[in-house]
Amino acid sequence: MPPQSPPPPNADDEARRAHIRSTVLAQVSTTPERRREALREFLGVTRPDLGRDAALALAGNIPPLLPGLHEKWADMFAARLLETVPAEQVALLCDGSEENAAALVLAYLMFLESERMERQIAADLEAFRREHPEMSTTGRNLISTVLGTAESARRDKATGYAKAKKARRN
């Protein structure tokens, strides 16, 4: 993770807020390939029944979150950090080192997992869904296709095993 340019030692809260925001956003703004691989791994863990090909197909078709949502959540994190952490500690986290940039990103992930942010994220995603109902239909169709393909592959595999077993008996 490349360190972000640190604010000067005598920086005000706005400069630190901007540094925190840019450090966090640098980590969530990844390449499409990295994003697709992370989604495939997530689907592999949460839905091992899908299989690698189905998980890859699904991951490749999941649209990215709007940058505006990431920016909103990064701003909320920066505001909360500045509100709750002593200024000297925030200054240390904003020194531009890779270690402190990693600590900021880890704190951001923990912030996203908080009960407050789980509610906020759900509300933001629900608002987006209401504004873009066509995305829900597209998503349902995609999931139906991928799950149908995975189920068909499982049936074909089971049929092949049954035929092989029957052939061995005869």
Image: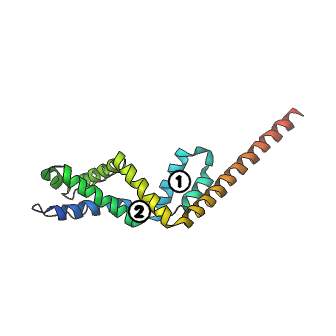
* Residue 93 percent location from the top left of the image: 20, 53
> Disc 2 residue type?
Thr
Q: Say whether marks 1 and 2 touch (CB < 8 Å).
A: no
The residue positioned 46% from the left and 63% from the top of the image is 128
Q: Residue furthest top?
A: 169
Q: Residue furthest right?
A: 170
Residue 66: quadrant of the picture: bottom left
Closer to the camera, 14 or 97?
Answer: 14
The colour scheme of the drawn protein is: rainbow
Q: Secondary structure at mark 1?
A: helix
Q: Is residue 119 visible?
A: yes
> Disc 1 residue type?
Arg
Residue with the mark numbered 1: 40
Residue with the mark numbered 2: 30
The residue positioned 33% from the left and 62% from the top of the image is 72
The residue positioned 50% from the left and 56% from the top of the image is 37
Q: Is residue 62 left or right of residue 5?
A: right
* Residue 104 percent location from the top left of the image: 27, 53
Closer to the camera, 95 or 116?
Answer: 116
The residue positioned 42% from the left and 56% from the top of the image is 123
Quote the CA–CA distance across marks 1 and 2: 15 Å
Q: Is residue 106 above or below residue 24?
A: above
Closer to the camera, 121 or 158?
Answer: 121
Q: How would you rate the neighbour count of disc 2 (Cα within 10 Å): few for under 14, some for 14-19, many for 20 or more?
A: few
Residue 170: quadrant of the picture: top right
Q: How would you rate the neighbour count of disc 1 (Cα within 10 Å): few for under 14, some for 14-19, many for 20 or more?
A: many
Mark nearer the N terminus (1 vs 2): 2
Q: Is residue 108 left or right of residue 42?
A: left
Q: Is residue 89 left or right of residue 29?
A: left
Image quarter hosting the N terminus: bottom left
Residue 7: quadrant of the picture: bottom left
* Residue 116 percent location from the top left of the image: 34, 48
